[in-house]
Image (spheres, helix red, strand yellow):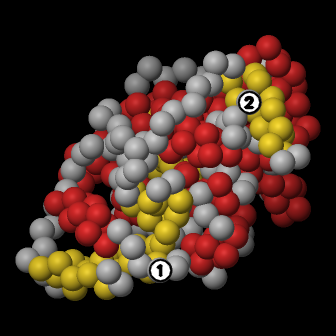
Amino acid sequence: MFTKAEITQIRLHKLGMVEPFTEPTTFIRQAIALQTQNHQPALVNFLQHVDMSWLEAEQFFASNQIIKIWANRLTLHTFLAEDWEMVFRVFGTRTNIVHRLCQKEGTDLASLLVEIDDLGRKREVFSRKELEAIIGEYPSQVTSSIIAQAAIAGILYLLPSSDAVKNYSHRIRLGNYQAWTSEPKANLEALMMLIRRYLKGYGPATWEDFRHWSGLNIGEIKPAIAGLEAELDTFTIESQAYVSLKGEKTMLTAQKIFLSGKFDQAVIAYKDPTWIMTEAQRKSAWTVNGHCSAIIVANNQAIGLWKYDWKKDTLQFTVSYFETPCFETEIKQELEHFASRLDKQATKIQYKGI
């Protein structure tokens, strides 16, 4: 149905790597979620896909429209608050590693969640230390997993903050509170909706891509796939089965330089990121501790990495090409555009590698 080149063009358009989004909610809805282990890289990732300043992005992240909760792969992500029930029904109603860890430790997870819920109803903002006091003395992995489970269960969310500060609030603070209970039919409909959203935002893709992005296994998604059969097209390229929503169309891609943020969904939303980079480049893009670097895309292909650092009043950019340096002028223009949207203005900009 599509060639690999056409799939690349479709994905680039959908992810805002050709034309930035003008409405931040439209972008988050398209992306579904942004990986957010660290606050500042997540803001950079967001900023590179929307037409906003850093201050405007900070204000949007601090609004009641946005929540930070653990979901996909039990990893911290930024979602629209309106999608929390979908997250609960897909991720919060299944047995996962948190249940297994608590069972191993002899911990009553259900009782702890009730206590956390009670704390959140009494306190507008509460800290990780207060949560740890409720949970008790356990290895950090167990404690963090229980907090994550409280998020996907629809109880608490992490407030926008610096990486060193961990403050939380209860879902009732968002207004229009309604208790959620697990209902098999509603849970299945939520999973079907998530798959539709994924294919709308990232497709054409493979089921392996969706499983990699969501952390769900094939047995968990099979009923939803069956329910969506009439809405999907399946086709094969080089022995690899792809799936897309019916009516998917090809797009012409303008030649454009795009600077992603770290953990950009263009890379981490697919099991195989070689749709945009070679295997050797993929190894360069991931650090030894598993962090996905910010990439430079040109002519529909990753050509290198970039980063920025503040040195007093100097903003220093570093570009590392995968191969031969190219597009120096265009990359400088994109870096200067990025710098123009930061609150802290540099008196000098330095470039390394271009």
| Residue 65 appears anywhere in the view | no
Looking at the rendering, in which quadrant would you find the C terminus? Answer: bottom left
Looking at the rendering, in which quadrant would you find the N terminus? Answer: top right
Residue 269 x, y percent position in the rendering: 63, 50
The amino acid marked with disc number 1 is Thr
> Between 177 and 4, which is closer to the camera in this rendering?
4
Q: Return the residue found at the far right.
A: 219
Side of 152 relative to 234 (left or right): left
> Between 295 and 354, which is closer to the camera in this rendering?
354
| Residue at x 48% of width, y 36% of height | 252
Instruction: Give the Cα separation between the discs numbered 1 and 2.
Output: 34 Å
- Give the answer, above or below, for where 231 lies relative to 319: above
- Give the answer, above or below, for where 302 lies relative to 76: below
| Residue receiving disc 1 | 324
The amino acid marked with disc number 2 is Met
Q: In which quarter of the image is residue 288?
A: bottom right
> Which numbered disc covers residue 114?
none
| Residue at x 31% of width, y 85% of height | 352
Q: Return the residue found at the far left.
A: 347
Please report whichever mark, 1 or 2, sits nearer to the chain's N-terminal start: 2
Helix or strand or loop: what does disc 2 sit on?
A: loop
> Between 80 and 329, which is closer to the camera in this rendering?
329
Badge 1: how crowded within 10 Å, few (<14), some, or many (20+)? few
- Give the answer, above or below, for where 342 lies relative to 157: below
| Residue receiving disc 2 | 1
Residue 36 x, y percent position in the rendering: 50, 56
Badge 2: how crowded within 10 Å, few (<14), some, or many (20+)? some
